[in-house]
Image (cartoon, coloured by chain):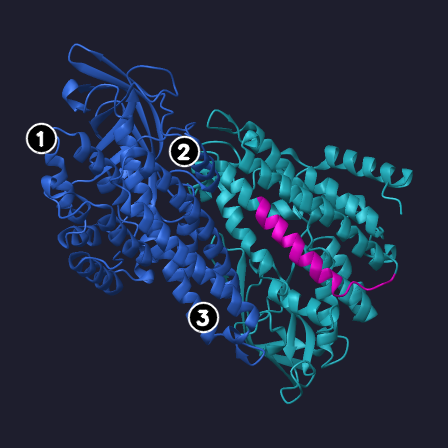
């Protein structure tokens, strides 16, 4: 057992650090640091910068333009990017769809879609959840009926994150209504500019429309947009979800949030002393830091097992639960640190306007919206209750 | 021991509950918030006509009650319906201070409050005071029969909708002294008063108010010079009871929505309320809500007690409400899944209010520390 990084890994970290120092635009960094909302072009511009360096797709093979980093390199990059307040990489095309195409798509599909993901031509969103299905994903009802060389799609998706920016959606659709729940599902790529596709934003508890409902009304989709085999979509979906969950531990995000929290606590005066001198607040901070230190290692254990070819299975469920609980606690502590200044709701300021009077410390305006937004972590990607059920069955064999 | 409400209070509760369930729908509230208005003026007037503000004042001031259990009954119902109309700062804080310290003439304002004809605000918290009631840096300089006020007050509930402000300022001592703090009645249109309004995360409205050499008569002082701290602490104790009772009402509403949802929502072919993992969490939640209710009863019952005993209950109750509130807000959202996160559905509004109440008058940590030091004293 050796917990230290190799000289190569340390050199890689230094390279990442100097890249971020040089290439991450200051204005973007400030927005992320203060928890402000990013525009579509903010996210696209960061993607373009990473793509120019060949670092946009860490997990893709080199032949498709990826960086082909190993698990440790990816961890190092994530840690450094988060600590530097870089925007997160929008995962839908890069780390959700692409692995599915690489594993199950046709060569034509890879050649067509992967470069477009890298160069920003396509913005993908995920069409999994449906009203009435949610964590019971296989209960989905959206239908695709074969009609010549097209599928005709009818139904509704929901919780489509950043769908308002997307021009493509990858969907799970029911192609055999008579088969068992999991067996009649297919994986379909749909151009959102096709007639019959409607996107409606959903305003959430933090006041922002981050997710959407997507409606399909007799949408004609070329049959060539089917990924893999008809009615085998559940297999691909599960593969994708496992990938989604390996990133969901969010160690980098938590490290960055902890650093911010410590800074805020040290610079906030409360009752004649700084907040990190308050024994109760300090104890909460220390506990979450201790949990995070252990979770980072749990994460590395799972990730390095995956890198050795052991597919992450139920272990990713542990990471999802622990990682989300830690991120939620950090957001809760940052909100508490803001004190009364957590109360004002200043959407114009969060959208980048600077003419709005923000009261109190600079992190205060985003602290409550962010705390409320973070509640989603234990709900999406298969709720934490579902993850516990997976652990009970797969690891405990109960 | 008798934990039943008196007949009058039960009637008040039933009447208020009926009025709000018929007239204060979640849809109307959302529409109002979207319009950018701070509150609904006609609902506000109707609440006054129902005698709700009167219930918060003693008979000597023209009210109908004013005791701890009156406040608790009213605010629990306001919390259950998610009412954002100006009542806390207006009747409990500013109104309560005038009731405590005001001269006969000053107290005529209370009649206007009870009738819903005037709105008062209490401007006390400052940008750096956080939860410390004794931290006052705004200054009041007396001279020639007049007072000159300067300073900035933050998070003033309904400050921009008020006709008159009760403002705290220092006449003597250093920033943290309890002695030396006075209160003054200032019209919002006085020269040198600047008010910047903003909505809060929970839909309520607050303001930052700047006083720049604002001149008022000596007669604007509430009570004697420099001794207002005790009255401020008493008024905040009453306001703390109000928001704790409000939190219980909001918790009850969130709990009811969640139970309904657990019965209704099906996954894997059965109602999710049949899953034992969720049942046990709902059971824990119920226990915490009952604990919260008991804590509110404790505080309501000790609101007239000597200072040391009263404040012990203030901190105990606020700490427990903060803990139970976070649990209820987070768990009810979680048990709902994505629906619980939407603005369109009432639950997210209750969750926001419950969590934001932790940021009023001291959060769980503040009151834990305070409870320990009060015990040691």
**Chain-order first, disc 2 or disc 1:** 1
Q: Is residue A194 above or below residue B365?
A: below
- Is label 1 in a helix, a strand or a loop? loop
Residue at left offset 48%, top offset 65% = B282
- Numbered range of the magenta stretch: A309-330
Q: Which mark is residue B374?
A: 2
Same subunit, tags 3 and 1: yes
Left or right of A233? Residue A356 is left
Q: Is residue B215 above or below residue A362?
A: above
Cα separation, mark 2 vs mark 1, equals 35 Å
* Residue B108 located within the stretch drawn in magenta: no
Q: Is residue A216 above or below residue A19?
A: below
Q: Which mark is residue B104?
A: 1
- Label 3, on which residue? B261
Residue at left offset 62%, top offset 49% = A327
Cα separation, mark 2 vs mark 3, equals 42 Å
**Could you tell me which chain the residue with mark 3 belongs to?**
B
Closer to the camera in the image, A51 or B26? B26
Let me know if residue A122 appears in the view: no
- Is label 2 in a helix, a strand or a loop? helix
Residue at left offset 84%, top offset 58% = A305
Q: Nearer the viewer, mark 2 or mark 3?
A: 2
The quarter of the picture where the C terminus of chain A appears is: bottom right
From the rendered image, report the letter of the chain displayed in blue. B
Q: Colour of chain A?
A: cyan
Q: Residues within 10 Å of mark 2 (few under 14, many from 20)?
A: some
Residue B342, x across and y down, in percent: 47, 60
């Amino acid at each position: 057992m050796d917990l230290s990084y190799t000289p190569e890994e340390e050199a890689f970290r230094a390279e990442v650090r100097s890249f971020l120092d040089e290439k991450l635009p200051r204005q973007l960094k400030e927005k992320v640091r203060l928890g402000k909302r990013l525009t579509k072009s903010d996210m696209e511009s960061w993607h373009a910068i990473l793509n120019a360096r060949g670092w946009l797709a860490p997990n893709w093979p080199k032949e498709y333009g990826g960086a082909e980093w190993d698990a440790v390199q990816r961890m190092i990059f994530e840690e450094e990017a988060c600590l530097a307040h870089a925007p997160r990489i929008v995962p839908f095309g890069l780390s959700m769809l692409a692995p599915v195409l690489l594993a199950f798509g046709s060569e034509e599909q890879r050649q067509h879609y992967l470069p477009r993901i890298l160069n920003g031509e396509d913005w993908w969103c995920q069409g999994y959840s449906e009203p009435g299905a949610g964590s019971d994903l296989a209960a989905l009802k959206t239908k695709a009926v074969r009609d010549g060389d097209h599928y005709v799609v009818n139904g509704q998706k929901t919780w489509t994150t950043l769908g308002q920016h997307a021009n493509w959606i990858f969907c799970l659709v029911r192609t055999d209504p008579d088969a068992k729940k999991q067996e009649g599902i297919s994986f379909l790529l749909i151009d959102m500019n096709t007639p019959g596709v409607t996107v409606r934003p959903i305003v959430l508890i933090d006041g922002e429309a981050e997710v959407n409902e997507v409606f399909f009304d007799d949408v004609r989709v070329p049959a060539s947009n089917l990924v893999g085999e008809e009615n085998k979509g559940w297999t691909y979906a599960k593969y994708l979800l496992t990938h989604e969950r390996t990133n969901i531990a969010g160690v980098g995000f938590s490290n960055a949030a902890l650093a911010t929290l410590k800074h805020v606590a040290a610079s906030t005066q409360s009752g004649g002393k700084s907040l990190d001198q308050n024994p109760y607040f300090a104890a909460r901070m220390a506990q979450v830091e201790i949990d995070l230190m252990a979770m980072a290692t749990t994460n590395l254990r799972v990730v390095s097992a995956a890198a050795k070819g052991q597919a992450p299975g139920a272990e990713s469920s542990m990471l999802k639960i622990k990682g989300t609980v830690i991120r939620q606690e950090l957001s809760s502590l940052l909100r508490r640190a803001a004190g009364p200044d957590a109360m004002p709701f200043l959407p114009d300021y969060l959208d980048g306007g600077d003419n709005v009077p923000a009261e109190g410390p600079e992190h205060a305006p985003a602290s409550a919206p962010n705390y409320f937004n973070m509640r989603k972590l234990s709900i999406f990607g298969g709720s934490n209750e579902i993850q516990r059920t997976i652990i009970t069955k797969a690891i405990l064999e109960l | 021991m008798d934990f039943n409400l008196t007949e009058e209070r039960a009637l008040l509760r039933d009447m208020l509950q009926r009025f709000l369930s018929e007239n204060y729908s979640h849809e109307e509230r959302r529409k109002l918030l979207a319009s950018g208005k701070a509150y609904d003026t006609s609902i506000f007037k109707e609440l006054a006509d129902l005698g709700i503000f009167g219930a918060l004042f003693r008979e000597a001031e023209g009210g109908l009650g004013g005791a701890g259990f009156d406040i608790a009954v009213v605010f629990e119902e306001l919390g259950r319906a998610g009412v954002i109309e100006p009542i806390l700062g207006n009747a409990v804080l500013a109104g309560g201070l005038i009731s405590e310290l005001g001269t006969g003439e000053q107290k005529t304002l209370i009649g206007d409050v009870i009738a819903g004809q005037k709105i008062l605000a209490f401007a006390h918290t400052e940008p750096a005071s956080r939860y410390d009631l004794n931290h006052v840096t705004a200054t009041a300089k007396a001279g020639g029969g007049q007072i000159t006020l300067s300073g900035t007050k933050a998070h003033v509930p309904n400050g921009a909708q008020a006709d008159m402000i009760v403002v705290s300022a220092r006449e003597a001592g250093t920033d943290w002294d309890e002695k030396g703090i006075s209160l003054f009645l200032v019209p919002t249109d006085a020269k040198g008063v600047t008010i910047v309004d903003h909505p809060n995360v929970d839909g309520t409205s607050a303001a930052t108010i700047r006083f720049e050499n604002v001149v008022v008569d000596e007669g604007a002082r509430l009570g004697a010079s420099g001794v207002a701290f005790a009255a401020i602490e008493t008024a905040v104790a009453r306001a703390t009871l109000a928001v704790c009772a409000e939190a219980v009402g909001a918790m009850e509403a969130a709990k009811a929505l969640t139970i309904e949802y657990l019965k209704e929502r099906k996954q894997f072919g059965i109602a999710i309320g049949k899953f034992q993992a969720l049942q046990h969490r709902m059971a824990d939640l119920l226990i915490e809500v009952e604990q919260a209710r008991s804590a509110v009863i404790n505080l309501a019952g000790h609101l007239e007690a000597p200072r040391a005993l009263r404040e012990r209950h203030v901190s105990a109750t606020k700490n427990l409400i903060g803990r139970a509130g976070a649990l209820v807000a987070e768990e009810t959202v979680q048990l709902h899944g994505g629906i619980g996160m939407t603005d369109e559905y009432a639950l997210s509004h209750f969750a926001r209010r419950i969590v934001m109440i932790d940021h009023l008058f001291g959060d769980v940590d503040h009151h834990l520390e305070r409870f320990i030091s009060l015990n040691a004293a």
